[in-house]
Amino acid sequence: MDQNTKVDHLFMLDRLRPGEPLLAPLVIRHASIGANSQIDALVDASINQKDSPERFAVECKPQSTTEVFRRAIEHATQSAKRLNCNPLICIPYLSPEKLKELEELSVSGIDLCGNGFVVVPGRIYVVRTGQPNLYPDSRPVANPFRGQAGIVARMLAQEPHWNTLSELTAGISRQSQTKGPSLSQVSKAISAFVEEAIVIKEGNAIKLVDPVGLLDHLRKSWSRTPPRRQRAYRSLGDKTNLSELSKSPNLAWSLTGESSAPHYCSIAQGGALKVAVSDMKMAESLLSLIPESVPSFADILLQETTDDSVFFANEHDDAGIRYASRVQTWLDLADGDARQRETAKDLYKAIIQDLKVS
């Protein structure tokens, strides 16, 4: 595919030509485009020419966001009911999740990549899936659940209601040890969340309406960032006082999600305590530690990282220990061993429950 291809209504309607497959083995027998101002096209399709064709009211949308997808379903369903035929939507890409939603609603849909679901109860049932997205959406943020935009998502997972973008941006800044996203970056992230029907805006106010979708997107988009450097140590004398790391305002630090788990869940801590830091040399200068060449004998593993999300929304205890946020802890555990993954499920349920109560 030419990456410069402009996907618009004309480009999509050109896909609906007689003789072309609607969704193999279904073939378009007749197409009426523009004859009805309230629907993009009326298409007759059948598996072979001997069969009586089925008619579909087609609604085309040149974007694949959740909000656009659901609007297309609503419009196609209303038009099909009015015209006494079958609803069908056409968008650039239908993910497996969107295909499942179409199936649950008994609404047909096709995309420009070869995926689709076409149903006529009692007569036709065709599914095609697994083709990659050849038409990535043009959106303000390429991946709104990673990087700085991902931090906006994590803030919403902690506090789902905000009166203004400025208030949300300031809230993120207060929770960030490193430089948080700018007002412009927050605005673009929220626009992307609105497109995915995860967030709604009521005037200036921002409200999370799909916490499950938010966390699921975060989980799918998240990948563990390997530390730039990692060093093992034994404590000198008594247990090392990690709160000493807070003496430098230029050092960001926190226990990793794995080591923060006992703070949130009933899970035993095994092995060395893992501490994420923004600057290895600075952290070493603040702690009294003995280098350990055998990691299994170590009390502490310092991990230098550039991942800002590790240093966001950290909780503190009375001893001044900084813990990874609940969301970061959940993500770390969900990527761990079988025992950690089971614990992650409980933490996930707790986060969702708190958001629903809010």
Image (cartoon, rainbow, N blue to C red):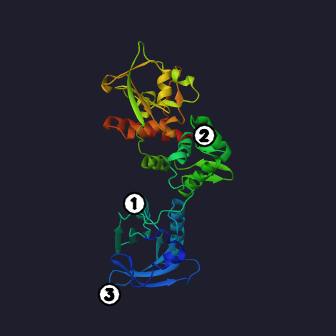
**Where does residue 123 sit, x and y in percent of width and height?**
35, 75
Q: CA distance from mark 2 to mark 3?
A: 63 Å
Mark closest to the chain's N terminus, 1 or 2: 1
* Vertical position of residue 33 compared to residue 286: above or below: below
- Tell me the tag on residue 21: none
Q: Is disc 1 placed on a helix, strand or loop?
A: helix
Q: Quadrant of residue 168?
A: top right
Q: Is residue 99 left or right of residue 187?
A: left
Q: Quadrant of residue 330?
A: top left
Q: Is disc 2 placed on a helix, strand or loop?
A: helix
**Where does residue 18 sit, x and y in percent of width and height?**
42, 85
- Three-letter amino acid code of the residue under disc 1: Pro
Q: Is disc 3 placed on a helix, strand or loop?
A: loop
Question: How many residues crowd around disc 3 within 10 Å: few (fewer than 14), some, or many (20 or more)?
Answer: few
- Tell me the tag on residue 50: 3
- Three-letter amino acid code of the residue under disc 3: Lys
Point 47% across, 63% down: residue:
136
Badge 3 vs badge 1, beta-carbon distance below 8 Å: no
Q: CA distance from mark 3 to mark 1?
A: 32 Å
Point 55% across, 53% down: residue:
193
Q: Given the current orientation, which residue lies at the most extreme bottom position?
A: 50
Point 41% across, 45% down: residue:
223
* Residue receiving disc 2: 172
- Three-letter amino acid code of the residue under disc 2: Ile
**Where does residue 109 sit, x and y in percent of width and height?**
44, 69
Mark closest to the chain's N terminus, 2 or 3: 3
Q: CA distance from mark 1 to mark 2?
A: 33 Å
**Where does residue 217 sit, x and y in percent of width and height?**
46, 50
Q: Is residue 246 visible?
A: yes
